[in-house]
Amino acid sequence: MTSSSDECDVLVVGGGPGGSTAGTFVARAGHKVILLEREAFPRHQIGESLLPATIHGVCKLLGVFDELASANFVVKRGGQFRWGRRDAPWDFNFRHHQMLEDCAADFAYQVERSKFDEILLRNAARNGVDVRERWQVTTVVTEGERVVGVRCKDNDANEREIRAKYVVDASGHGSVLASTVDARQHSEFFRNIAIYTYFENGKRNPPPLSGNITCAAFDKGWFWYIPLSGTLTSVGAVLGKEYADQLKKKDHSVVFAELVNQCSLIKDFLSPAKRVAEGIYAPVRIRRDWSYTTARFWRPGLVLVGDAACFIDPVFSSGVHLTTYSAMLAARSINTCLKGTIDEQLCFDEFEARYRREFRVFYEFLLRFYDMHQDEDSYFWSARKILGTSEVSNAAFIRLVAGAGTTAEEFFRGKAEWMSKELRERRASPINEKDPALVALRASGKAVVEEAFKGSTAEDRVVTSALTTSADGQTWVIPRMPWKPSRMSAYGT
Ligand code: FAD
């Protein structure tokens, strides 16, 4: 029997950044939201290096900006890459983008995800979300084609059913619901594995760069080096899938130490350091199969956000940005449908079109960035081409890696201008099929990679980008001058 407390407007699966963000924005619009999280928070998660768009965009809108500022997270002003043709490391700094500097949004944080995710989850509860930890969702409940709820185990292992008008799947990489929407398509090109752990007392770059992320390529892949406090550092190696066998045969601690020895920059950074011996940061962890997308991001009654829908690669720290951005878009679609002002298909196509467009910016740039035969000027040039701008020097690169590639207007120019957003977006026209860079990319054989990533069965779908955001940011509205629907593939191209 389903009790009355087991019914709600929106059921959110997962209490990571995706679930907390979607839940908060829907509850704030006055709807009844239940959020089920399998673990008890705080819990460990990877994905510690954040982007300005997350901190100054979604987090500000969620109302946690001040709480984050007082949480003592390490300030990230940019990053350092040992990447490409040149041996010497090169830096980028968010301050060198005028838009970010003007908005005082020229920094992000490096966060212990156990702390960051808990701040977002408790904020969701404060905003009225009924947060239930140690509740595990097992499957969806359907009526015809429509998802009308979930089955789950509560915190006493009792089987339960909860009915909802909409279900948001924010359960991440291991989602058990995403396949009920459509097939997950794994990338042929990005098939990497990560092995990572934590150190005390690693070296720091001199201030003000001491909080920056370092990404250092070496023969077998690349390392991330993320300062999480004055002394704690997250260190991980991203390796090609051809090294997967080595990880099976040897102790992971031994493999990790061997890898560090092969990357001179990281070896030097860690020379005074000791691996954390106890607690959540002691294990050497492995993650694999993270580069995928889903052929569709929604079906009637169910929407996928964050890693439940797609993820590509950690090198630009885009995961939490794409997650919180998609959750905000999904919340807008749900709020609009619950209000009954715009057709459901139109609302969720809008969500999907915008989400894929932002995903595609990172995806296309990553394809070029993984070409190690280039130098940084060539990467900057690629960023300009992908964003379709003529920004000088490294400005387009900085905008892209700040998470402001296609979301700049949304996050950095303030709510007052949201009403005319669609006109500015149309002018920005991010991808031009005749763009020489795109033509060259396809000609150079990477189109094959792209096709492989799309999957041969991925059909073109007509998606509209016909809606704009309401003045309060909670819903979609139909603009006075609707756009012509455009044709987009599953990858937003
Ligand atoms: P999650 O953070 O995974 O949260 C999902 C939640 O759902 C979890 O709390 C889980 O317990 C819960 N859950 C799962 N199943 C169920 C269920 N059945 N019922 C109830 N609850 C459930 N991103 C960055 O921004 N910066 C980085 O530096 C970065 N580095 C990365 C490095 C690696 C190697 C990888 C693989 C990813 C990295 N990411 C990074 C990506 C980042 O980790 C994810 O994009 C982000 O955590 C996704 O958030 P989410 O809310 O979608 O999912």
Image (tube, rainbow, N blue to C red):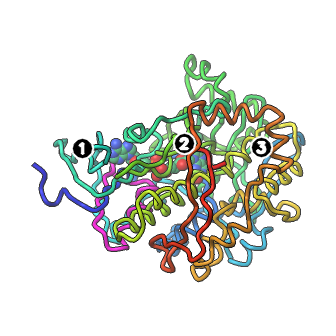
Instruction: Provide the residue designation for mark 3.
Output: 369
Q: Tell me the residue that label 2 is attached to.
A: 276
Quick one: label 2, few (<14), some, or many (20+) residues within 10 Å? some
Instruction: Mark 1 and mark 2 in contact? Answer it, CB < 8 Å.
Output: no
Q: Residue at x 58, y 67 (%)?
A: 55
* 349 or 403: nearer the viewer: 349
Query: Of circles 1 and 2, which is in front?
Result: 1
**Label 2 or label 3, whichever comes before in sequence order:** 2
Image quarter of residue 407:
bottom right
Which element type, helix, strand or loop, lies under badge 3? helix
Count the labels in the image. 3
**Is 65 situated left or right of 153 in this image?**
right
User: In the depicted view, which residue is nearer to us: 42 or 147?
Assistant: 147
Residues drawn in magenta: 15-40
Which marked residue is nearer to the observer: mark 2 or mark 3? 3
Residue 363, compared with residue 485, is above or below; it is above
Taking the image as shown, residue 408 lies to the left or right of residue 251, namely right
Q: Quadrant of residue 138?
A: top left
* Image position, residue 141 (x, y; %): 26, 44
